[in-house]
Image: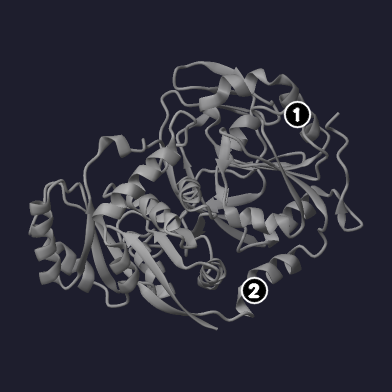
Amino acid sequence: MTNRKSSFLISAPSSNSGKTTLTLGLLRALKDRGYRVQPFKCGPDYIDTIHHTTAAGAPGINLDTFMSSEAHVKNIYQRYSDSADVSVTEGVMGLFDGADKMRGSSAEIAALLDIPVVLVINAQSMAYSAAPLIYGFKNFYPGIRVVGAIFNFVNTESHYRFLKDACEDAGVEALGYLPKNEDLHIPSRHLGLHISAETDYDHIISRLAEIILKTVNLERLLEVTSVDQIFENESVLVDQKRIKQANANARNLRITVARDEAFSFFYHQNIEALQTIGEVRWFSPLDDTQLPETDLLYLPGGYPELFARKLSENKPMLRSIHNYCANGGLTYAECGGLMYLGKAITTSKDESYSMAGVLGCETTLKHSKMTLGYRTLHWDDLEIRGHEFHYSVFKDQDMQAEPARITNAKCIPVDAPFFRTKNTFASYTHLYWADKPEFIQHLINKSNLKADGRLLKADSQK
């Protein structure tokens, strides 16, 4: 089946050019005009995708050629684009910035999927000098097509005329601009953009959309990014079949996943993979008081340090989780989930709050340092990739590591153990198992809780 649709990737010469701001505004503007819009995000960022979901009303999907295979990226892009009128992909960092030269870059994604690129350029201190910049990005790598440019921080039509001249001489179409407006600023925190109940993201995104309708030529944007997409019904099911085959012995599991303001950093595709082997139920460590009946508990990352007091004060939930894990309940925790399962979290203000006490560690944000990078977990015969990003560090640690090793993007070992206590597994790395469904089955096998193709009930939530 061949459909004429619009697909494009929004990238920039560098970070902090306004990619996310423009992307969110475009997603909402297109949605408000009646288009079915599908958002994607290059790279491992799980915060931008949350904002994408808010803006488009459809789940934000990560496309990452380091964490997953090219075939997987093609399959998920094809599957989610199939029902959309417009597919909008936000790039990561600068257009050609990857884990190793262009590897994993936005340009690599654009070339792999054969989708055109629209540059967003910070023009706050620039006029006609944009011409050689645009020309260079257009012609540096013949494997991609840079078809348009949208400028950020442009406050006058006369300024924009200089930029339009620059585009014309560089051979790229000028598609509009965004004026500078501090009221539309979304605060940054840690990775990507901040998630906070105190910020009305929906209002900011709606205002962005209103401005874009006035200053960006949406009709022309859709015209220059129109593509023929051929969907092969067989291939869109490849990932689902692999997941089911990899977890052939696991069916009808009761899978419980933490999701609230403190725990929201997970990949949508990972949750989809879990849904093929059981029922996924959500719970809030902040507000709920007891785990439901559970075969597999997943505690993803988030900002537990921002809610440490409230998490600590919810003693019934801490006891419920502690008992579940102490009685051998299968648990996988990553980053913020690891911190929550520790003995205590010390905030940047040097305030210490007790946590679940499942793991023999304390973590702290005082005198914190940034740890960032792609990771590969080598565990028995399994290799699975992910991403590590955090500011917290171990204040005290007395934990047993699994006989596994973790390496960075250049295959150099890093000090990031994969911990195990009974059947609780934990790491700072956010693993991407949507393209490596064997990981979940390996957790089940290592836990020794399997009986007749099903996890034994851990009688621990009482």
**Mark 2 or 1 closer to N-term?**
2
Return the residue found at the far top.
Answer: 351
> Percent x, y for residue 110?
38, 69
Q: CA distance from mark 2 to mark 1?
A: 38 Å
Q: Is residue 241 left or right of residue 51?
A: right
- Taking the image as shown, residue 79 lies to the left or right of residue 26, namely right
Q: Position of residue 193 (x, y in %)?
A: 41, 41
**What residue is disc 2 on?**
238
Q: Would residue 384 appear left or right of 315 to someone viewing this image?
A: left
Left or right: residue 234 versus residue 58 is right
At label 1, which amino acid type do we have?
A: His
Q: Quadrant of residue 442?
A: bottom right
Q: Is residue 100 above or below residue 325?
A: below
Position in image of residue 292 (x %, y %): 80, 37
Q: Residue at x 47, y 36 (%)?
A: 195
> Which residue is tagged 1?
322
Residue 455 bears which disc, if any? none
Nearest to viewer (mark 2 / mark 1): 2
- What's the residue at 71%, 20% (across, down)? 315
Looking at the image, is 260 positioned above or below residue 384?
above
Q: Residues within 10 Å of mark 1 (few under 14, many from 20)?
A: many
Q: Circle 2: is it few (<14), some (14-19), or many (20+) Cα within 10 Å?
A: some
Q: Quadrant of the N terminus?
A: bottom right
Classify mark 1: helix, strand or loop. Answer: helix
Q: How many marks?
A: 2
Picture coordinates of residue 404, whole percent (x, y): 63, 51
**Image marks 2 and 1: residues in contact by CB distance under 8 Å:** no
